[in-house]
Amino acid sequence: MSARERQDAQKGRAAAAGLLGGRRVGIGGVRLPDRPAAWTAFDEEVRRARAHGTSLPCFDRPETRLCHRDGRIREAALDGPDPALPLVAIRCADWVPAVRERARRILGEALAADPARTLTDLTPLVLRLGRREQGAWALERFEAALRAEDPVLAPWWRPARPATWWRAERPAHTRTGEQPDTVLAWLRWSPDLATRRFATRITLDRGSFGVRELARRAAVEQDAVTSTLWTDAALAALAAGAPGDAPDRADADAAVDALLGGHLPMVRASGVTALRRAGRAAEAVRHLTDRSGTVRACARWLLRQDGGDPYAYLRALVEDPDRITRYAVTGFAECAGRADAPLLRALLDHPCGAVRAAAVAGLRHLDVTDLGLLRPLLDDPSPGVAREASLSLRASAGQLPADWLLARIAPGLPRHTRLAAYRVLHARGGVPGLRASVELLTDEDAGLRVLAGQRLGSLWSPYRPPALPVRDPEVGALLDRCTGVFSDHVLERMRSQLGLPRTGTATEGY
């Protein structure tokens, strides 16, 4: 369950508690749920309260009666005037056959009378209920309704804002370029990912869009699963059937261009591979410096298939002060050899911090770890360079002076320098790593305090002793300062594992 769903569930439980406590519905009272997770939590909370024998002054309300533990009361509540459709949908998956059949009849009537409203409001909830043992009925009916005919939304129900329970953060046209006028269009816009994917699959099965539109939607979609659906459909359309059935050249080029400008790396990589079929393989050089490694790898493969040399092109970029970029350095390192290390070393003096950081990462990719070269970079003014240097120095952390590293976590130094030095100290382990973590437990920087606590917590395991010297008095003194991280019992266990004397704070007999 996502954080948003947990928050919705909490609101649903609060609404149930308010109704059961005698509060009224409306302004100044209880606000009924407006999201799927809130409705299911509302239902569960009412049943849980009834099961525990809680005093329930408002169990005569239709909403609470629809969630009653007694199936006869739930069935009778369905005969009341205008039962809440979300709760009716939940009752369609009820474990009591009589309740189930009555709820399904009501939901079927609502679906026939007002398909647009019913489908738009209840599809996200029905998708979740479909996972239940008796939940397939409603999902099958909703899917059949959407596949048979896409209901058009009435003009009065097509504002620029979303439906009541959605409250999306931004208008539809800013993400998809459309104002939804049908149910499927509205569902494709839903911030609920399951709903968006469901509507996309049905739309693709209906074959509603051409290749240009499929590619455009793949490019602007930010959900990876939904974007994959659009991308696969666009690629299939580009490769469709006989030449006479294939999209014309203008549409194909527009689709490839849209994929190349996609938000997600997978979409851009698909666009790069589509360049070959479109007869535009020479354009692969433009994508050798993409920010995504996957796209860069596809571009190198395509360029080689076309007889080009990505290494020569990238080396020329790196050697040109006017064209060098961080991703040009990264791409060059991915196809370079150890003989190219001097060129990357020369870039450690580049004025741009991002280029220097990429050079350090490139040297690590080539397995070049020169301590004399990397050690001063922990003090680099660029956070990216210090971070990459610390990653490169972790394997050789034991060869660096502990006092020199400890001096770089002292208060007053730049945060990125302290963090990089601490990363190396933790990789070094032993007493210096423990000493650094204990010192940072009381640091003014909240982030460093949390990180130090997490690193200290990783020392404890009931199955093995900590990776620390045995019977070392300094280790015992440092552990005594970790009372906020470990319980007394755990501290005594660790001291016992390390052969240290007991402190006397734990209960005898442990």
Image (cartoon, grey):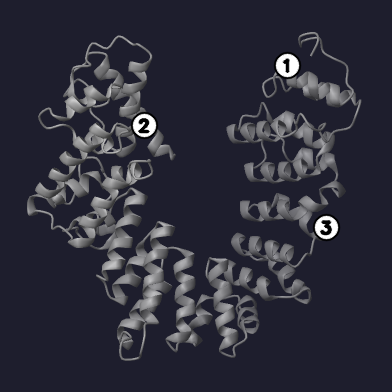
Q: Residues within 10 Å of mark 3 (few under 14, many from 20)?
A: few
Q: Nearer the viewer, residue 90 or 396?
A: 90
| Type of amino acid at the residue the image marks with label 1 | Asp
Q: Are marks 3 and 1 in contact (CB under 8 Å)?
A: no
Q: Which residue is mark 1?
A: 488
| Element type at mark 2 | helix
Give the spatial CA distance, label 2 vs label 1.
36 Å
Judge by depth and name the residue closer to the eye, 33 or 316. 33
Q: Nearer the viewer, residue 127 or 30?
A: 127
Residue ID at (74%, 41%)? 408
The amino acid type found where label 2 is placed reads Ala
Q: Which residue is mark 3?
A: 372
Say which residue label 2 marks. Answer: 9
Q: Which mark is residue 159?
A: none
Return the residue nearer the eye: 506 or 201.
201
* Rendered image quadrant of residue 24: top left
Q: Is residue 285 above or below residue 103?
A: below
Q: Nearer the viewer, mark 2 or mark 1?
A: 2
Q: Residue at x 26, y 72 (%)?
A: 209
Which quarter of the figure is the N terminus placed in? top left
